[in-house]
Amino acid sequence: MCSLVNRMRNAKEFLMCLIGGILLISIGAVGGIGIFAFLEYIGTVSGLEPLVPIVNIILYALVLIAGLGGLGVIIGGYLMTTQRFGTGKFVVGIAAGMGIIGLIIQIGTIIYQYGVQGGMDFLGATAMSAGGLGVILSIIARQTAQKPE
């Protein structure tokens, strides 16, 4: 196994995605839920209800990838070691990015309900959690991965 990892392109990045994905799976992180809640909230508040189904259809494929959460990060990390490097980077970016968007929406909701101090407390707790570490590892892996020659 070790010799296989040493010969693999972007082996360190794959291992970071593997660890990050396992951390995301361990806490059950799923990115798409926050987006749908946010769209539903915006549609009901601003009277844009006719646009919500259209946006939901456009985001469906992205939410499927993000819904995989940690599994999407692991699959994308593996794809970055193959000839499908660009696809792997895209999948990791979507899986981790949707988690970040969901986190930002959660922080905004908490700041709205409990004030800035509540949001800062939540942000600090999240950054130190397994999910926060998983997202950070996934983003670092995506940014440091090198396209194969």
Image: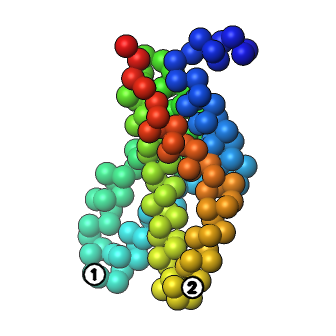
Q: What colour scheme does the image use?
A: rainbow
Residue drawn at (31%, 51%) of the image? 58
Instruction: Judge whether 103 appears above or below 22 on screen.
Output: below
Label 1 CA crowd tier, 10 Å (few <14, some 14–19, many 20+):
few
| Number of numbered tags placed on the structure image | 2
Quadrant containing the N terminus is top right
Quadrant containing the C terminus is top left
| Amino acid beneath label 1 | Gly
Dot 1: element: loop
Q: Which residue is mark 2?
A: 117
Tag on residue 47? 1
Where residue 67 appears, as percent x and y from the top left, is 53, 49
Q: Left of 73 or right of it: where is 28?
A: right
Dot 2: element: helix
> Foreground: 64 or 126?
126
Q: Left of 27 or right of it: where is 83?
A: left
> Foreground: 57 or 142?
142
Where residue 56 appears, as percent x and y from the top left, is 36, 58
Where residue 43 appears, as percent x and y from the top left, is 33, 75
Q: Of the residues tagged 1 and 2, which is closer to the observer?
A: 2
Residue drawn at (31%, 59%) of the image? 55
| Amino acid beneath label 2 | Gln
Residue drawn at (61%, 36%) of the image? 16
- Which of the marked residues, 1 or 2, is nearer the chain's N terminus? 1
Quadrant for residue 36, please give it: bottom left
Where residue 76 appears, as percent x and y from the top left, is 51, 33
